Image (spheres, rainbow, N blue to C red):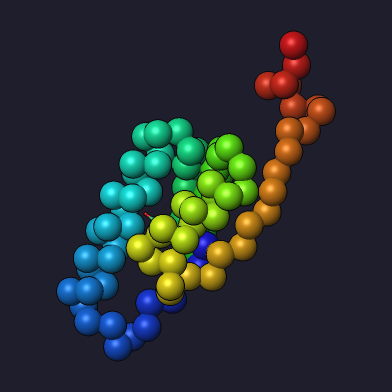
């Protein structure tokens, strides 16, 4: 997720949107659907890992992001790798 909040956004609106985004994200993290969030060093971007039931649920989560209108989001579906020791029986 790349974030680009326009410079002319009122600082109070910006602060409120960022605070609401944090609460929204942390609720989903606590619920187990938003598994990881990492800051991309040097950029107003993050790399996140989601574990959701289906694409519709991920779409709902992403569209619900308070900063969504100021974001560019790229989704890369991932599958388990057969060499992952965590997947060995
Ligand atoms: O700061 C960001 O990368 C945007 C963001 C997504 C969830 C969150 O809390 O911030």
The quadrant of the rendering that contains the C terminus is top right
**Residue 79 position by quadrant:** top right
Q: Position of residue 10 (x, y in %)?
A: 22, 82
Q: Position of residue 18 (x, y in %)?
A: 29, 63
Tell me what residue is drawn at x 74 percent, y 27 percent. Answer: 84
- Image-based side of 13 in relation to 32, left or right: left
Q: Which residue is at the far bottom?
A: 8
Q: Position of residue 40 (x, y in %)?
A: 51, 59
Ligand 1 positioned in quadrant: bottom left
- Image-based side of 34 in relation to 23, left or right: right
Q: Is residue 39 above or below residue 44?
A: above
Q: Is residue 60 above or below residue 10?
A: above
- Image-based side of 39 in relation to 15, left or right: right
**Residue 43 in view, yes or no:** no
Q: Which residue is at the far left?
A: 12
Tag count: 0
**Residue 20 position by quadrant:** bottom left
Tell me what residue is drawn at x 43 percent, y 74 percent. Answer: 70
Q: Which residue is at the far right?
A: 82
**Residue 68 in view, yes or no:** yes
**Residue 26 position by quadrant:** top left
Q: Position of residue 69 (x, y in %)?
A: 43, 73
């Amino acid at each position: 997720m790349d974030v680009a909040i326009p410079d002319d956004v009122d600082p109070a609106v910006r602060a409120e949107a960022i605070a609401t985004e944090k609460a929204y994200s942390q609720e989903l993290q606590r619920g187990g659907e938003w598994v990881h969030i990492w800051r991309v060093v040097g950029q107003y971007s993050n790399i996140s890992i989601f574990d959701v039931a289906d694409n519709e649920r991920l779409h709902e989560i992403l569209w619900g992001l308070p900063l969504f209108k100021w974001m560019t989001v790229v989704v890369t579906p991932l599958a388990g790798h057969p060499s992952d020791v965590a997947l060995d029986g």
